[in-house]
Amino acid sequence: MKNGFFRGHGLGNDYLVMDPKELSFKLTPKNITAICDRNWGVGSDGILALVPSKRADFGLRIFNPDGSEAEKSGNGLRIFARYLHATGKTRRKRFTVETKGGLVSVDLHVDRYGDAAAVTVEMGIAMFKPDALPCSLNVPELIQQPIQAAGQTLTFTGVSVGNPHCVVFKPVGESWSREDLLTFGPALENQTLFPKRINVQLAVPTGPKEIFILIWERGAGETQASGSSSCAAASAAVRLGLVKSPVTVKMPGGVLHIDVAPDFSLTMKGPAAEVARGTLSPSFVRGLK
């Protein structure tokens, strides 16, 4: 379908999936921003682009709504997997996808209607070293490091799951507010320790195998749910001894289940919903050009 798109979401984190070969325009940062605008465009938390791969069954590029590019997205991967199945690009229930944040394996869970309503993704290995983020701190690992944000001193754990994350925990029994997220999220994202910016999770353990997180995504802002954020926060919580695996991660948009292996390899399972398929209008496309 010329200039077509597939719209889906993972727990309220919504993406448009597009095949650049079917577009009459290029996915430049300016065009991506215009399409993702919720008032002037189609509106989404980003665009997933199907691209060729020599290393995997499919290739994926992930674009934030500000036009920047993300290395990996857990929700994006689940939506992308459902798109591939729903549009007949694959009938296999297990395949591989190459992202800028590494190669992942995907398993589809097809329901009685024939929809890939849930997806399991092997998300790679969590790393806590500054050069994996990257981070300008000269320390062996980013475990319980102090950081300045919005005039306060916080303690963060730095994690890379193919893309960079800054996890800040409160003790059991305390909580984070949306006001906290809107204050600390952008301040931490743009902290000078992280020259390429960073994704932020404000987290609190809520049980022996459960955490709750609020999410501020690099290039997107406040997000209802995030697969890679869930993986990062779960691995940080296990590393700090706050919870044990498997970890149930609760977010405003819903719940994901993360298995953290002893070597910190991560497996994520969660839903993927299809919302709509459509076509950009000729007049809108002329505006992009």
Image: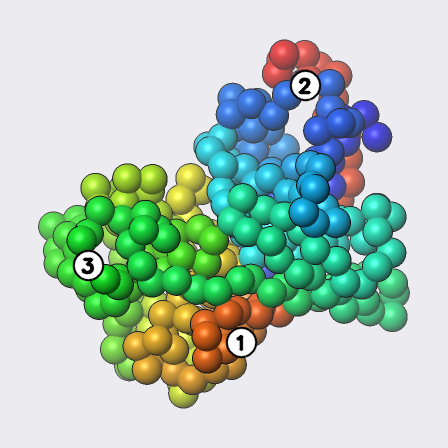
Secondary structure beneath label 1: strand
The answer to whether 77 is drawn above or below residue 2 in the figure is: below
Spot the residue most to the front.
54
Given residues 236 and 17, the one toward you in this image is 236
In the image, residue 63 above or below residue 104: above
| Helix, strand or loop under label 2 | loop
Q: Are marks 3 and 2 in contact (CB under 8 Å)?
A: no
Say if residue 43 shows up in the picture: yes
Disc 3: which residue:
139
Query: Which residue type does callout 2 highlight?
Result: Phe
Q: Position of residue 69 (x, y in %)?
A: 49, 37
Q: Residues within 10 Å of mark 1 (few under 14, many from 20)?
A: many
For residue 259, which numbered disc appears in the image?
A: 1
Looking at the image, residue 124 sits to the left or right of residue 178; the answer is: right
Q: Is disc 2 surrounded by few (<14), some (14 to 19) or many (20+) residues within 10 Å?
A: some
Residue at the image point whose x is 87% and y is 48% from the top: 88
Identify the residue shown where x is 28% and y is 39%: 195
Q: CA distance from mark 1 to mark 3?
A: 27 Å
Q: Is residue 44 visible?
A: no
Left or right: where 229 falls relative to 11 = left
Element class at badge 3? loop
